[in-house]
Every structure is written in structure tokens, then in C-alpha cells.
Image (spheres, coloured by chain):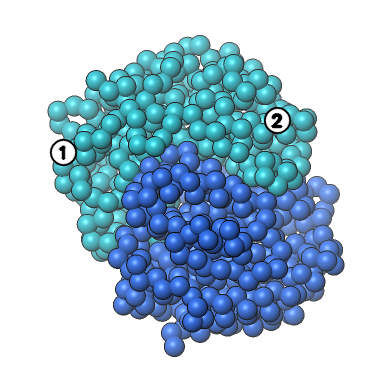
Chain colours: A cyan, B blue
Amino acid sequence: MSWLEAELREQPDALARLLERQEDAARAAADAFRRPHIRYILIASRGSSSNVARYAQYLLGRAHRVPVMFATPSLYTIYEQPPRLDGAMVVGISQSGASPDVVAVLAEARDQGCPTLAITNDTSSPLARTADAVLDLEAGREQAVAATKTYLNSVGAVALLFTAIGNDAVARDELLRMPEALEAQIRLSLGSDAPPLDQYRDTIGATVVARGVNYGTGYEVALKIRELTGLVTEAYSPADLMHGPIAAVQEGWPVIVVAPSGPARPSVEEVVAPLRARGARMIAISDVRAVLRRAQTRLPLVPGVPEWLSPLTAVVPGQVTALRLTELRGLDLDHPRGLHKVTLTR
Amino acid sequence: MSWLEAELREQPDALARLLERQEDAARAAADAFRRPHIRYILIASRGSSSNVARYAQYLLGRAHRVPVMFATPSLYTIYEQPPRLDGAMVVGISQSGASPDVVAVLAEARDQGCPTLAITNDTSSPLARTADAVLDLEAGREQAVAATKTYLNSVGAVALLFTAIGNDAVARDELLRMPEALEAQIRLSLGSDAPPLDQYRDTIGATVVARGVNYGTGYEVALKIRELTGLVTEAYSPADLMHGPIAAVQEGWPVIVVAPSGPARPSVEEVVAPLRARGARMIAISDVRAVLRRAQTRLPLVPGVPEWLSPLTAVVPGQVTALRLTELRGLDLDHPRGLHKVTLTR
């Protein structure tokens, strides 16, 4: 078995480990978020971790009503004119904790006196050493170049932080049930009932549409397929897609809609008609029967997952799609051409 | 002549009109940005206007050191849980001023007591009526579906605002020279020396790489080509491209680097070697001879434009590339299939 598949299958255990071991650390980190002078959260990240940041933007924005912004590392590293960060709580997300640009943002924030938190799989990394507080991803070593369990546990870490900031016992219980739901999701997505993807083997690309708490899921599904297969995959919110980019959706172009039940679903579904009118082949990731029925390819989600936690299960059919397409195209699952596990950018 | 080409050629006049007529309005609007309790700027936008927002993020971030964040409209419209915006200066950018999601963000900000500014080409639009202050784009009616002069004047409006906030006479003089530089750029890009693009007629897509103040230029060039030609074009910062997405760059894939002289140029140039190693065909937009020399296709920029204003000229070779590729592919320049001038999303 490839490392990629082994690590994909290991995700429920990795998530359970995170939830078991990092609750105290999350509680300690949460205090800084509640300080009265905090006006917004600033997140520094690259790659898959930026997709986790998109989840944090909606989750923390919605429930705690704190605006979340993404850092522009070049202001710190290239222009050397970092913004004034008074009122910011600053979070770095990086599985390796090594990318100089992400570290530079946290170092500047610390120098400006802002509270800082590192979410990383390496507690001895430069990022961890720079931050006031650390959440350890507890994902164990990840061997495949493409992230699966470190992505999943980063999403889990943000969810854990969310329950800690709100001191929300109901949310905590919902989160603690997720390793089991994830286990069921992986069984479902890898099972013998999973639809064949042969018709997509020779596609040149695909578009993923998602919104709200699953906006980051859309980006992660697109990135996973892209890294592993070399296909030109991309993600859009339904609104952004309609403001021009839909022009590139031609006859037969595959479009994956990520549409679990919840407030964002109708908005995602609104683009199905214009996409169909352009001849797109629709692939649906959903727990809603009506959504699945309207798609050519149906990637079902296990039922009963609260919307705010659906990114933990909704990414799985996307990861499996990336895995299957890579196999169909006869490519190396663990070492995509020209990519490295740790990327150092400034 | 198509409306698109006429409006592209009209840009220097449109910019001159903006600078002549809106200086007082910019000065009045600037006061709100300088209030002592302002901690950050929040921008709501869609489509081309989001590319202008990316320019504002670097320009205002760099010089005034104020962090700039983008709104997440679904928190306002779909989840109905808008974030608390204390400390925010809120800006809506929309040529039509009509999209309900952009208006919703400004309405909420106003209700929360934040200062608001609309940058729009329609001063009687819902967006203009919602905001405390308005900057009129003064672009005149735009007939082509794809934005050219409204984009350019939105960038100009942000630059004008920047000089007003800083009360910066040197920057103001530099800006006032831009209609002339833009005129020269359009002559250069549309002139008989412009390189033929026939070799790209049958490409399926392209990637645009840009960083810093031109990050938004990269997105706008990608969007313009995409809207007009239906090609799968996309934009990345060099760092984001290296963190995975470069996997989709295959033999012969066109990559446009936007690299005017300035601090961001070396970082953009760093990706040229890995892109070449994958067999990409390089197209360079630059005023730097060495950068142009290394590219297969050279799209020169007029010299002497300060980096902070280079987005006004650097977008032009991209607009012309979109125009030429559309002609080569025999498509309608003014009415791309399935797109509309005003897109209403929530």
C-alpha cells in the first residue's frame, strides 16, 4: 500500500490522538483569543495549511464573530514594511513549521507584542520556537509528499480551539464523535460501492465549488488532485465563479460541488444550472440525496455530521478521488513529480 | 472596432478624468482612514474588483502599515452571523455597485457604526447609497462585458486615495504622470513591434505569476484572458505556486510572469528555473531587459514607472494578450459566452 493510502486510512486514529492529547494545550491557547483588546485574528500559512486557514476564517468568524485575515508574507519578507498589528491575535499554521515566510510573520507579531500561536506537527520547528503557544498536530510522521493526516488534524486543531475559546460543551461532544464519523466516511469512500472514475482519467482539469465552512475543503480537494495527478484543478466560491471565471467551463469539464447539508448548500446548488447549461459533468460530495441524484458521479457523505464539522468528513471523498485518479493515470502516489515534502519560501 | 478595444484605448483619458475630478472626494474620504481607532481596512468586492482589492492590500499595507482584509460575504448573507467590526474602515469596490453581497457587507458595517467608502462607477447604485463616502470611478459607460477601464480606474482610485491618506505630494506628482505613461504603454503593447501570439492559439490554459503590488495584476490578467477566451487561466504568487500547484505545469504550458522592476521582482524570477525545468513556455511582462531576454515571448513595459504605480501599466500587455488571443480564436470580444455585465450574487 502507498504511504498516501496508509496515511489517509490512519486519519481517524490521528484525529482521536489529537483530541485526546491536546485539549489542555487548546484551553491554554484559547485564553489569548479572549483578551479584550483582540480585534481580529491574523493567520500565516502556505499550501494545504492555507486551506485550513480558510476553515478558521468561517468557523471563528461565525461563532465568535471575530474577523479573520490572512497575512501577506511579502510585506514582511520582501518589502520589509510589515503592518502594525495592534489588536491582532496571530496564528501560524504549518505542518513542518519550517517555511521562512510563515515564521517571519510570527516573529514580527511577537516583536510587536501580539499573542502568537503555532499549529504544527513539529514542536521543535522554528515556527513552534517563535510562538508563545503551540498546538501539536499529533499526526505522527507523514511520509507521502501530499498532506492528508496533517491537513485533517490541522482542521481538527482549529475545531478544538473553537470549542475551547467558546468553552462550549455541546460543540466539544460533537467534535469528540468525529473520529468515529471519519472512520465510517473512509469506509464509505473507499468501499466497493464507490463509483468508478474511469471516465475522468483523461480530463485535463476540474473545478471545485464550495462555500462557507467548506470553502477551504474545496481548495484542499483541488490542491490534492492537482499535486497528485498534475491536472489543472482549481477552487471557487459559487459567487466568485459567476463573476467571470465560469467562462472556462466548457462541454465535458468536470465540476465537483462540495455541498453537505447546511446554510451554504443552496448557494452552492445555485451554480449547478448554469454549469449544466455549459455541459459540465457534475460530481457531488454531499449527504443530501437530492444533491447526489442530480450529479453524474455521486460521492456520498455519512449523515449526521454537524455542518461546522463537515470539513473533516467532506474532504475524504476528495482525497480518495485524488488517489484513484492518480492510480488510473499510473503515477507515483508518494512522490509527485518535482514536489518536496517541505517547501521553503520567503 | 470592438467596444473592448475602444475601451482599452480609452484608459489614459479615463484615468486623467478620475485624477482631475476626484481629488477632493479622495481627500474627504481619506480623513476616515486616519481616525485613531482604525485598526484595519476591510474590503468587500467580487470579480475584477477583488483584483483591485489585492492591490489595495499591498499598497495601503506597505505605506500606511494598516493591515487590509477581505470580507467573507457569506458570513453576512448566508450565515447571517457577521463579525464584529470595531476598529474597521470598510470599503466596497464594485463598478456596478449592484451586487447584493458587496452591499450587505457595507450595510452591516454602517449599522455597526464603522466608516464606509464606496468605490463605484455608478454613484446612484445601492452600494453608493449605502456608504458614508463615495469615490466615483469616472470611467464613463463601459459597454464590453469584460472590464478594462473600470478596472484601471479602480486601481487609479486606490492610488489616489493612497496619496490623499498620506498627504504625499511626491506620490501625487508620480500619479499625475500616469495617464501619459499609460498612453505610451498602450502604444507599445498595441504597436507593430508587439510579438505574435499565434503559438498560443490552441493552448488550453495558462498560469500567471505575480507578487506584491502586482499580485492583483496577475489575477486580473488571468481573469481577462479567461473571461474572453474561455481558457483555463489562473494566478499564483511564486510562493503559493511552489507549495504544490506547480504540479500542474506540464511541457509547453504557458506561464506569464509579471515582473516590473522593484522589490518583488527577484522573488518572481526565482520560479523561472523550476518552471523551465518542467518545460513551461515563458512569457514576461517587464521593463527589465534581462527578464525579457530570458522569456520566449516578451511583453515590454515602458520604463520609469515607480513600482507602486506599475499595476496601472503592467495590466495593459495582459489586456492586449487577452484581446489578441480572443481574435486568434475567432470569439466575440464584447459578449463572452454566458457572461453578463452585471452579476448579482449573495
Amino acid found under the numbered disc labelled 1: Pro
Identify the secondary structure beneath mark 1: loop
Chain of the residue that carries numbered disc 2 in the rendered image: A
Label 1 vs 2, first from the N-terminus = 2
Question: Residue B332 at what x, y percent from top left?
Answer: 35, 78
Residue A207: image x %, image y %?
34, 50
Q: Quadrant of residue A335?
A: top left
Residue A184 seen in this snapshot: no
- Numbered badge on residue A196: 1
Q: Position of residue A317 (x, y in %)?
A: 29, 34
Residue found 39% across the figure and 28% down from its top: A145
Camera sees residue B287: yes
Identify whether A154 is placed above or below B88.
above
Q: Which percent across, then down, holds residue B119?
A: 64, 67
Residue A30 vs residue A77, the one in the foreground: A77
Q: Which element is circle 2 on?
A: helix
Three-letter amino acid code at disc 2? Ala
Viewer-side residue, B204 vs A43: B204
Please give left or right for residue B125 compared with residue B168 in the image: left
Q: Is residue B101 left or right of residue A113?
A: left
10 Å neighbourhood of mark 1: few (<14), some, or many (≥20)? few
Look at mark 2 in the image and give the residue it sits on: A107
The quadrant holding residue A107 is top right
Task: Say which of marks 1 and 2 sits in front.
Answer: 2
Using the image as rendered, state which of residue A345 and residue A250 is in the foreground: A345
* Residue ranking furthest to the bottom: B1
Quarter of the view holding residue B157: bottom right
CB atoms of marks 1 and 2 within 8 Å: no
Looking at the image, which is closer to me, A37 or A104?
Answer: A104
